[in-house]
Image (cartoon, helix red, strand yellow):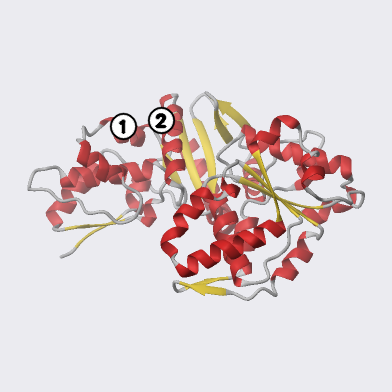
Amino acid sequence: MASKTQNIINLNNFSKILNWFSETCLRFLNHSKFIYLKYPQDFDKPDFASISALFNKEFLDHISFVDNEDIKDLASEYFTTFTNDSSNIESLISANPLNQSPILVIYNFEAPSNGAQLWYLNHHIVYSRLINKQSVIFLSRYDFDEFVNSGLNCPDYEYANYQLSFTKIIKLIKSCFTDVNLFFRQSRPPALTMIELALIQKLHEKKIPITIGSLINDIPVYISVVNEKIKLSIEIDPISHFDSILFQAQKSKQYLVLVSDGWQILKFTTKEINENPDECLNTIEGILNSAKGKFGLGRLIDNVIVKANVSSFNADTYQTLSIDHRAGPSLTKGIAGSGKTRVLIQKLIDLISNGINPEKIIVFFHSGNSLRRSKDLLENILSKSNLAKLTLTTFE
């Protein structure tokens, strides 16, 4: 963390770390990364002009800068709108200037002190950046431990039966924390998160050769295993299976390009790596060894799923709308033989091919016969691992 390296960060290294981190984020877009840095002792004017001057000019068009005092004002404005009329919040989110760039720099960063600031930090900075696979640079007068201790005094905020606390936000931030110590290594690898480093260390212990930071047809592949038998990309999602609709569409196109070139994509969550690193490693080894059957953790996206997703069903306009729908509940109606079950099957394939965790999906069929027919179809398309994680049941 930042506090461990603070004694050796002078202004020159401070600027170099910012550019090292920014270069990684801009080269490998669609990977959320957070970094927290305390100002060096020889930096006495933390304003927009002095902060932006620390970055390479070619990066500035891709970075948004905001003072923490402005965030307090935004928090008050957005929170008032949300509590008075939550129907307007979507337009506020889309117009939020903090969501417009792949990298957000918050300078003079401080812990929230009230419910409005806590809510805004969670929904409009940390969570929204994670959903959209964007990165944040937190710059503060305090080291990280001081920041955390200060934030513990912020009262929790409860809404819609959800208890929001500062400790929950810190957990989210840590899920994408970059290890600053990597900058000082002689090899100077790309900016890696703590979770990525933990997985890489496990792979090294098993003597599994990996490549860190590749571009395949201009698509970022962050951790990969490539040999004469397999091309495997390993991804880590910080907030489980949920992505923005725009990001899902972008990722689908990238997956199609990769699997068309013979790649397989294995997705883990931060929680899986944190709590069951050995089980995650077993999944990777099983795939590398071409093992068949159920793996405990991870979701594999391969040529079979994507081919089925792209070409196995000639859906009409209304069926396509039902398959592609993501924004909340939907109802699909049709007469017997109109293809309702096939639309449902294709939607399942579409969700899984976009990295949705099959364990998060439950499907109710109107009869056991319908369930059996659908399961037979899925067995010819999905891997045994993904099929085993689906919950398929009936109303009977």
| Location of the C terminus (image quadrant) | bottom left
Residue 363: x percent and y percent?
Answer: 26, 56
Residue 246: x percent and y percent?
Answer: 44, 42
Instruction: Look at the numbered disc 1 and give the secondary structure of its residue.
Output: helix
Q: Is 195 on the left-hand or right-hand side of 371? A: right
Above or below 292: residue 82: below
Name the quadrant containing residue 343: top left
Along the viewing direction, whichever of 289 and 149 lies nearer the viewer: 149
Residue 13: x percent and y percent?
Answer: 85, 41
Q: Is 303 on the left-hand or right-hand side of 392? A: right
* Mark 1 crowdedness (10 Å alpha carbons): few <14, some 14-19, many ≥20: some
Contact between marks 2 and 1 (CB within 8 A): the answer is yes
What's the CA distance linking mark 2 and mark 1? 9 Å
Name the quadrant containing residue 27: top right
Above or below 222: residue 85: below
Please give the label number shown on residue 310: 1
User: What residue is rendered at 82% in x and 40% in y?
Assistant: 15
**Residue type at numbered disc 2:** Leu
| Location of the N terminus (image quadrant) | bottom right
Please give the label number shown on residue 142: none
Q: Is 70 on the left-hand or right-hand side of 29? A: right
- How many numbered circles are shown? 2
**Residue type at numbered disc 1:** Val
User: What residue is rendered at 53% in x and 40% in y?
Assistant: 234
Above or below 58: residue 362: below
Which sits earlier in the primary sequence, circle 2 or circle 1? Answer: 2
Please give the label number shown on residue 256: 2
